[in-house]
């Protein structure tokens, strides 16, 4: 009997270890073990002594007040000090879409606290210090996000962004873009594309079946997520109109906590924390009608 109990404990221990080691690597499997769990990237980055995941960004006590745009969620990380040039509209129709004077508005500034290539990704506040009253940072070694790092499992490189002019535009209101490009963007009340009758070839993705005959509601061809585009737009205050007036930020496409993001099709192995798949350009076509 004792032998059986010992065996059961050993098996349970192995299972638990496997869970800790691999949980979160796949999409929608949680934050632990994911790319946003810096403990999983030791020794490249400095792990937390207690193995905490959330502490690299959040803390329940002694959080930073007023960082970024003043709406930091129990923030525990040094702010980015990098000034980046915003995306410059190329299309004449897009030039009427105003950019916010601060292109890092909302969650974007929090993302850039690690992804700016300058701020140490493992620079988080001490859980025992009083940060907002002049307490000292507890800094990890100054590891910045590099463009050449690949983890032990061979997963894709961790990237940093040092030029907003060469990435998808952020810091503009979806409603402004919707008005400037009639018929080219879906209403923000739509969800993200979860499934569609297409194969891995993007050529079979019929984007024109997106709408019903009125052009205002999803067609039956697509299954959309319960997470709406407007739910991911920062600062949305439009509760009565047809279009959200919130800003597009990094968090409009990316689920940073790895909880409701899209799982790739069978045979593909990536996790970019996206609300829709890469296959068939579903993430792009969740907003764009092309």
Image (cartoon, rainbow, N blue to C red):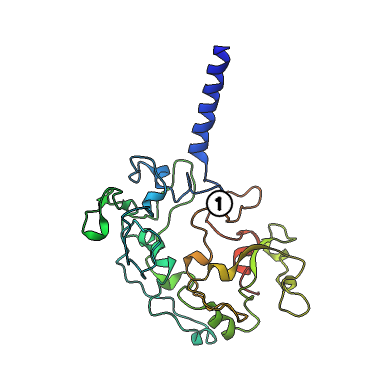
Q: Which residue lies under the disc numbered 1?
A: 270
How far across and how far down the image is residue 108, in percent?
A: 42, 66
Decide: few, some or many residues near mark 1? Use Cα within 10 Å; few <14, some 14-19, many ≥20: some
Residue sitting nearer the eye, 214 or 149: 214
How far across and how far down the image is residue 17, in percent?
A: 49, 32
Residue at 60% x, 56% y is 262
How far across and how far down the image is residue 211, in percent?
A: 73, 74
Residue 268 lies left or right of residue 34; in this view the side is right
Outermost residue to the front? 61
Residue at 56% x, 47% y is 29
Q: Secondary structure at mark 1?
A: loop
Picture quarter with the C terminus: bottom right
Placement of 122 over or under 43, stated as above or below: below
Residue 144: name its quadrant. bottom left
Q: How many marks?
A: 1
Residue 197 lies left or right of residue 176; in this view the side is right
Picture quarter with the N terminus: top right
Residue 65: name its quadrant. bottom left
How far across and how far down the image is residue 278, in percent?
A: 60, 59
Placement of 283 over or under 93, stated as above or below: above
Residue 110 lies left or right of residue 142; in this view the side is right
Residue at 65% x, 52% y is 265
């Amino acid at each position: 009997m004792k032998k059986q109990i010992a065996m059961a404990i050993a098996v349970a221990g192995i299972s638990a270890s496997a869970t800790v080691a691999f949980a979160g690597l796949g999409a929608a499997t949680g934050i632990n073990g994911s790319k946003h769990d810096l403990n999983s990237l030791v020794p490249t980055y400095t792990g937390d002594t207690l193995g905490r995941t959330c502490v690299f960004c959040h803390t329940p006590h002694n959080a930073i007040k007023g960082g970024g745009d003043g709406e930091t969620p129990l923030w525990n990380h040094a702010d980015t000090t990098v000034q980046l040039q915003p995306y410059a509209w190329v299309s004449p129709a897009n030039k009427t879409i105003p950019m916010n004077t601060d292109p890092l508005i909302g969650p974007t500034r929090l993302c850039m606290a690690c992804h700016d290539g300058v701020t140490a990704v493992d620079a988080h506040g001490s859980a025992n210090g009083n940060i907002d009253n002049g307490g000292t940072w507890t800094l990890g070694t100054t590891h910045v996000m590099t463009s050449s790092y690949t983890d032990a499992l061979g997963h894709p490189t961790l990237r940093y962004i040092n030029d907003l002019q060469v990435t998808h535009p952020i810091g503009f209101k979806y409603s402004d873009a919707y008005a400037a490009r009639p018929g080219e963007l879906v209403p923000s009340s739509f969800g993200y594309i979860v499934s569609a009758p297409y194969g891995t070839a993007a050529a079979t993705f019929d984007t024109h079946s997106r709408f019903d005959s009125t052009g205002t509601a999803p067609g039956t061809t697509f299954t959309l997520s319960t997470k709406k585009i407007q739910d991911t737009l920062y600062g949305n205050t439009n509760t009565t109109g047809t279009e959200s007036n919130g800003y597009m930020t990094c968090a409009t496409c990316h689920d940073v906590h790895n909880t409701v993001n899209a799982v790739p099709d069978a045979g593909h192995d990536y996790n970019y924390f996206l609300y829709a798949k890469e296959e068939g350009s579903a993430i792009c076509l969740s907003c764009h009608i092309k």
